[in-house]
């Protein structure tokens, strides 16, 4: 495998840059939230406002909203903020957002100069063109001389598809997240181990590898390349996808931040199963919940591994279990295992949970049986009436794996409430033993 393939396996990164208030976060939402979201109604999960994955155009990519990173400072000050620079450095394409209503301001020029210095491709999105003469609105910005200049109305979702299309030339052809990895060893289960700094990721990976002494190869490259480590255990083959440079940390300069959301998102996207490692000695943090939300949103199977279980007394263990049970109720389908990466205990159970979650995530569902299950669920409990009419659910068929996706055809499905969706999800979960994986339910209107 050459370096090009390795890169193709990681999602490309697109950064949204521009002055405050031009509509970056509105655009971010339009790009990242529009899909039938799995986490839309999960209590307790805060979406990360700065990072998301866009899956609208068939070639997924990570979207970074640098506006959120720059805080409240204006113009150049914001631009020089270290994090904006880093986002630009990490991106393959820059979307420069300007405001058609305010017109071209000096700060826009300054920002563009900064963007040009990066040498990266720039797509200019002229936002808020709703109700304006588009030709005129674009005219003013033509003097920037950016070939890819597009009108946009992020708030009305107009021009979003065209914008994605304009990005395509710079997104790797086969960014199919997993294709390059799958080609390597189709049988192996791809696992991303994620977690906050110091949760014990490096210790766990080294422990897994040390025990088996099966490090066949390690594809290291530039900082953007993934590192994949094959591993065989208990008769199953795995590929560990390195997260946030876990294994590199000791070798690379201090400047590499310990926790990179982008790398974590990329690793999750490239994996089939995400293992979230948490430290039993610390409370579950918002960041842990955000990571869970991101794994669920990416549709990945999930195992929660509570590390550093050694050294806790019975009382502490009980407290820890109770706290987890309470806070993880929204992903009650995910298996929680208790391990000590340091001492190697609980690892057999961990790997078994990974294998099971993977099996559930890739289970083949049959159309006839799905429809029968749907009919029974519908007969047992119907969705509430909408203006005197009940939404009708007619038949179901499978819509894909990892996550298992169930497509349900019916009428008035727009009016189906989250609670009813959850009810159906639970019915399918029980029927097909879909433990350890999110389940995606999509409704389609048909008469
Ligand atoms: P950011 O600071 O660049 O992230 O900008 P926001 O996304 O927060 O948007 C700033 C303001 O512009 C908000 O009041 C949005 O509702 C508004 N806005 C965003 N996009 C559009 C658009 O396409 N048309 C109009 N008319 N307003 C928009
Ligand atoms: P990472 O930042 O997630 O890669 O975390 P490390 O693997 O570097 O671990 C952080 C610290 O936690 C190190 O001092 C490890 O020795 C310690 N640690 C990791 N796993 C365990 C464990 O199972 N038990 C205990 N007691 N300490 C652990």
Image (tube, rainbow, N blue to C red):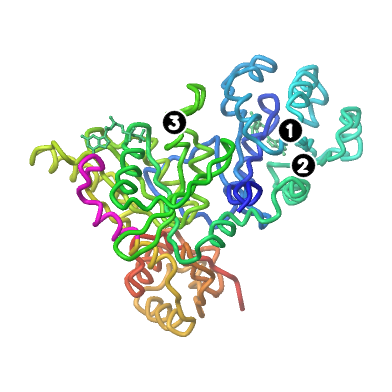
Task: Tell me the crowding category of disc 3: few under 14, some 14 to 19, or many 20 or more residues within 10 angstroms, Cα based.
Answer: some
Name the element at disc 2. Answer: loop
Lower position in the chain sequence, tag 2 or tag 1: 1
Q: Which mark is residue 249?
A: 3
Viewer-proximal residue, 328 or 355? Answer: 355
Task: Kindly identify which numbered label has been placed on residue 152.
Answer: 2
* Quadrant assignment, res 78: top right
| Magenta residue span | 340-354
Residue behind mark 1:
97
Q: CA distance from mark 2 to mark 1?
A: 9 Å
Q: Is residue 369 above or below residue 407?
A: below
Q: On screen, 428 above or below 329?
A: below
Characterize the local packing of mark 2: few (<14), some (14-19) or many (20 or more) Cα atoms within 10 angstroms. Answer: many
The quadrant of the picture occupied by the N terminus is: bottom right
Do the CB atoms of the residues marked 2 and 1 lie less than 8 Å apart? yes
Q: Is mark 3 within 8 Å of ligand 2?
A: yes
Q: Earlier in the sequence, mark 3 or mark 1?
A: 1
Secondary element under disc 3, as helix, strand or loop, is: loop
User: Is ligand 1 less than 8 Å from the beta carbon at label 1?
Assistant: yes
> How far across and how far down the image is residue 204, in percent?
31, 43
Residue 6 at x, y = what percent? 60, 49
Q: Quadrant of residue 64?
A: top right
- Taking the spot 77% from the left edge, 35% from the top edge, the residue there is 122
Q: Is residue 277 left or right of residue 371?
A: left
Residue at 39% from the left image edge and 60% from the top image edge: 437
Would you say the beta carbon of the disc 2 residue lies within 8 angstroms of ligand 1? yes
Q: In x, y percent, where is residue 413?
A: 53, 68
Residue at left offset 40%, top offset 68%:
424
């Amino acid at each position: 495998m050459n370096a090009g393939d390795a890169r193709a396996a990681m999602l490309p990164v697109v950064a949204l840059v521009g002055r405050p208030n031009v509509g970056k976060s509105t655009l971010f939402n339009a790009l990242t939230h529009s899909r039938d979201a799995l986490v839309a109604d999960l209590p307790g999960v805060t979406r990360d406002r700065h990072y998301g994955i866009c899956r609208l155009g068939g070639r997924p990519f990570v979207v970074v909203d640098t506006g959120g990173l720059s805080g409240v400072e204006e113009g150049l000050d914001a631009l020089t903020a270290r994090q904006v620079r880093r986002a630009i450095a990490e991106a393959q394409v820059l979307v420069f957002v300007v405001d058609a209503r305010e017109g071209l301001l000096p700060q826009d020029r300054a920002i563009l100069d900064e963007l040009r210095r990066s040498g990266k491709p720039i797509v200019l999105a002229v936002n808020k063109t709703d109700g304006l003469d588009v030709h005129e609105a674009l005219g003013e910005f033509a003097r920037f001389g950016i070939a890819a200049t597009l009108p946009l109305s992020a708030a009305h979702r107009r021009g979003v598809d065209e914008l994605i299309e304009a990005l395509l030339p710079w997104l790797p052809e086969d960014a199919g997240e997993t294709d390059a990895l799958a080609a390597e060893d189709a049988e192996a289960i791809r696992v991303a181990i994620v977690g906050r700094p110091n949760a014990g990721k490096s210790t766990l990976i080294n422990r897994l590898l040390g025990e088996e002494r099966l490090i066949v190869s390690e594809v290291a490259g530039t900082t953007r390349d993934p590192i994949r480590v094959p591993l065989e255990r208990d008769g199953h083959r795995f590929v560990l996808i390195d997260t946030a440079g876990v294994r590199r940390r000791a070798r690379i300069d201090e400047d590499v931040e310990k926790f990179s959301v982008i790398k974590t998102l990329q690793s999750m996207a490239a994996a089939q199963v995400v293992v979230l490692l948490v430290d039993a000695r610390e409370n579950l943090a918002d960041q842990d919940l955000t990571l869970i939300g991101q794994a669920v949103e990416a549709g990945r199977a999930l195992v929660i591994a509570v590390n550093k279980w050694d050294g806790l007394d019975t009382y502490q263990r009980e407290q820890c279990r109770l706290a987890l049970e309470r806070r993880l109720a929204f992903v009650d389908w995910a298996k929680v295992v208790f391990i000590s990466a340091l001492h190697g205990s609980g690892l057999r159970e961990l790997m078994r949970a990974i294998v099971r979650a993977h099996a559930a995530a890739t289970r083949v569902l049959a159309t006839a049986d799905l429809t029968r299950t749907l009919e029974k669920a519908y007969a047992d409990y119907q969705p509430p009436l909408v203006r005197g009419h009940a939404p009708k659910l007619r038949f179901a068929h499978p819509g894909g794996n990892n996550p298992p996706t169930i497509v349900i055809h019916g009428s008035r499905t727009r009016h189906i409430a989250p609670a009813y969706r959850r009810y159906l999800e639970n019915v399918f979960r029980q029927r097909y033993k879909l433990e350890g994986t999110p389940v995606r339910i999509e409704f389609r209107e048909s008469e």
